[in-house]
Image (spheres, rainbow, N blue to C red):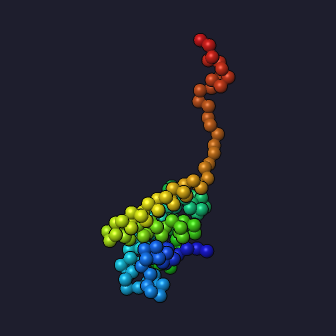
Amino acid sequence: MATTAQQVFATAMGLMDQLSPGGAADSPDTREYRDRTLLILNALRGELYPYSDTYDADRRPGRPVAAVIRDMDSVIGLDDHICQTVLPYGLAAHLLMEENPGAAAFFQQRYEELRSRLAVGVPARSEDILDLYGGIEYGSFGRW
């Protein structure tokens, strides 16, 4: 399943307790949030892209960048775990920054906690170590 910007927005609205009585994320009360969502998600995607499963597949010359999210129905170029678990907290933090700093701080802290957990799962690459000093490992300098 590929997560869309609309799905992340709906999850963030649920976290912020901004869903309509019928459970819809889109309502006149959330219009301002919706208008700011794409800008915020596009900023956060670059921060989270190195932790995504889609990062290794994009090995072009230069610094890899996730695809821009053009509209709310666009698929986000990150793996579903990040989109469904981490991004909603980052989005909620940014949307509430001026309106409710206490709630924004909670969401930001949770976002940073989840982002740091992602770093643990990033596989490291190994390479041979070049011995620049030569001879030390055999004890040839053991006596003067």
Q: As drawn, is 1 to the left or to the right of 73? A: right
Quadrant of image for the N terminus:
bottom right
Return the residue nearer the eye: 126 or 22. 22
Q: Residue at x 43, y 77 (%)?
A: 17
Residue 68, percent across and down?
47, 69
In the picture, residue 35 is in which quadrant?
Answer: bottom left
Residue 123, percent across and down?
61, 53
Residue 113, percent across and down?
49, 58
Residue 76, percent across and down?
52, 71
Q: Is residue 121 above or below residue 69?
A: above
Return the residue nearer the eye: 23 or 48. 23
Q: Residue at x 62, y 31 (%)?
A: 131
Q: Is residue 111 above or below residue 23?
A: above
Looking at the image, the residue that sits furthest to the right is 138
Q: Residue at x 37, y 83 (%)?
A: 29
Quadrant of image for the C terminus:
top right
Q: Residue 56, can we see it? A: yes
Give the number of marks.
Answer: 0
Q: Residue 42, can we see it? A: no
